[in-house]
Image (spheres, grey):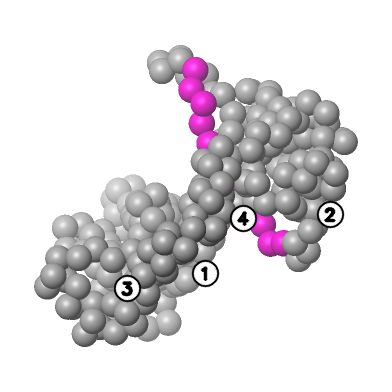
Amino acid sequence: MERLLKLQGGIDEVLERHIQDEKQRWREILKRIFDVIKHLASQNLAMRGHATLKLVSSYDTVMARHLRNVRENSGSVSNLSHDIQNEILSLLANTVRDKIINEIKEAKYFGILQLAEVIRYVHFDCESGHATVKETLSFVQLDKLNAAGYEEIILPSLEEVGLNFFGCRAQMYDNASVMSGSISGVQTKLREKNPKAGFINCDNHSLNLAGVHAASVDPTLVTFYGTIQELYVFFSVSIAHWKMSEKLELTVKKECDTR
């Protein structure tokens, strides 16, 4: 008995070793769950149940034992619920956003592109040097679609992540009057607060709008583009029609007058 106690230690030591082993086991399990979710999120792939983890378990004994234990012991802790998944996704999103915000602060000056809250800034990397990058910080909900509504969203969104609007040197929107208006547009209202936040319109959008308006006064072009749209409608409303287009090796696209 004395020899056994010397080899294994007392009850408290045995329990402590068991606790440490259990901690390590869960670390290994959570590491695999985290890596799978991180991979799916970075590749813009959907989280479809436990299918990916089951694939991993085919080649990994730790995950295989864990999934087997979950199946055999209903009600046991699994850390496979949607709540855990969403929590990990939230942690990943916050980490990425914090990194982007730190880079923007280091760059000092930035430009606002659009209200998926996209920020353009110059990032310096020791290996690659200077690079102009565009990053999405967040998606915001607009309750009012006028210039005041945009203003009420843009400024608080920047403040929320610790960015000073006075570091903004460019506003880059399309030519919709609510955004580009010189009297009461979003760019005008924001320039009243920061005159250095110059407005840069989308040249491609301007050229496209000019082409659309020019084509709209020519009956031949109106008929041409109208026919293209009707062909798309004809093939897209029916699976049978779409299969017909595949047999004819036709790629039918919707006519779009905004881009």
With 196 as the anchor, is 66 left or right in this view?
left
Q: Earlier in the sequence, mark 1 or mark 3?
A: 1
Is 47 above or below relative to 126?
A: below
- Residue 98: x percent and y percent? 60, 39
Asked whether the beta carbons under mark 2 and mark 3 sit within 8 Å of each other, the answer is no
Badge 1 is on which residue? 83
Give the quadrant of the N terminus: bottom left
Check the image and name the residue furthest to the left.
247
Q: CA distance from mark 3 to mark 4?
A: 35 Å
* Secondary structure found at label 4: loop
For the residues labelled 2 and 4, the Cα–Cα distance comes to: 18 Å
Q: State how far apart marks 2 and 3 are (Cα).
A: 41 Å
Nearest to N terminus: mark 2 or mark 3: 2
Instruction: Give above or below for 200 relative to 26.
Output: above
- Label 4 crowding class (10 Å Cα cut-off): few <14, some 14-19, many 20+? few
| Front: mark 2 or 3 | 3
> Comparing marks 3 and 4, which lies closer to the viewer?
3
Depth order, front residue of 113/246: 246
* Residue under numbered circle 3: 231
Residue at image mark 2: 148
Earlier sequence position, callout 2 versus callout 4: 4
